[in-house]
Image: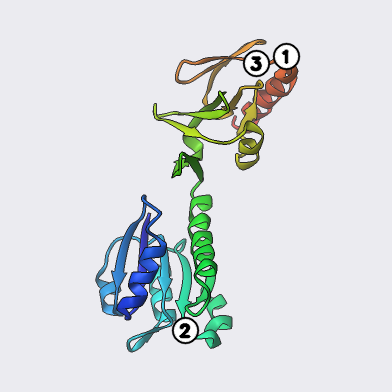
Amino acid sequence: MKIAICDDEAAALSRTKQFLSAYHDAEIFEFTSFSQIVDFKDKIDIAFLDMMFGDDSGFDVAEHLKKLNPDCIITFFTNYAEFMKRSFEYRAFRYILKEEPPEFIKKQIDDTLSEYYENNSLIAVSYKNKLIYVDLNNIEYIEMINHTAHIQMGNGDKHLWYNTLENILKKLTSAFIRCSRSYIINLNMIKSLSNTHVVMNGGATITIGRNYKKAVIEAVRNFEKRNI
C-alpha cells in the first residue's frame, strides 16, 4: 500500500505521517511540490492532499493521481473549508480541516485506510495490541481454540485473532460458512466434501457439526453452481 502525503508545510507533513505511523504495511511518500509528484512513477493507492500546493491546487494533484490510478483514494487535509463542495467532483473520500481536534482527524484518516482495505478484500486482525491486515480471499479456514481464533491462510501462514466466530462471520463474505461450533471454512478452498467432513486444499480434514450439516451441503452445492 503506497500512501502519498502532499503538503508544502513541513509541520503538516510530519503531523500526517505521525497519524499513519500505526500502519506498518504502508509505504509513505512525502511531496512538497506538484513537480515531485509528476516525477514519481509508482502507483499511489491513497493520497492526503493539501488544497493549496505552491502554484498548484490539490485539485490538480487529485486529477493527476486519478489518471494514473482511477482507484486512488483521495482525502483532502487542508485549512480551506471553502473548497469542500468542489472536492466531490474529484470523488474525494474525506475532506479534513487541519483545525479539527486530533481525535477527529485520526478517525478520518483511519476511515480512509479502512476504505482501501475493504476495497482490496483485506480484513483487520488484532492480537496482543498488534494489528495486521490479511487477504480475505486467502483465508482457508478459521478455528476457535481457547477463546482465540486461529486463522489458517491458503499460503501456509497462520494468524491469531482475539474475537468470536459470531463476530468474525459478520466481517466475511458469502464465500465463508460456519461448519461447526469451532470452525469457519472458505468454500473456495474445499477439496472434497462428505456427509460428515470437508477436506480443505491444504489437507486439513474438518468435521461438519450435526446442526450445520444441511446448511453446509446446500452452500457448497449452490457455490459450485455459481462457479460452473
Tag of residue 36:
none
**28 sits left or right of 104 in the view:** left
| SS type, badge 1 | helix
Instruction: Report how far apart the C-alphas of labels 3 and 2 lie in the structure.
Output: 57 Å
> Which x, y percent locates residue 50?
41, 78
Label 3: element kind = loop
Q: Earlier in the sequence, mark 3 or mark 2?
A: 2
What residue is shown with label 2?
79
Mark 3 and mark 1: Cα distance apart in space: 6 Å
Q: Looking at the figure, which quarter contains the N terminus?
A: bottom left
- Front tag of 2 and 1: 2
Q: Is residue 68 visible?
A: no
Which residue is under mark 1? Answer: 210
Separation of residues labelled 2 and 1 (CA atoms) = 60 Å
Label 2 residue SS: loop
Whether tag 3 and tag 1 are in contact, CB under 8 A, the answer is yes
Q: Which residue is mark 3?
A: 208
Q: Position of residue 136 (x, y in %)?
A: 51, 39
Is the residue 26 above or below the residue 126 in the image? Answer: below
Q: Quadrant of residue 197?
A: top right
Image quadrant where one finds the C terminus: top right
Residue 170: x percent and y percent?
65, 40
* Residue 215, position as x, y percentages in the image: 73, 23
Image position of 193 with respect to 28: above or below: above
Q: Nearer the viewer, mark 3 or mark 2?
A: 2
Amino acid type at mark 1:
Arg
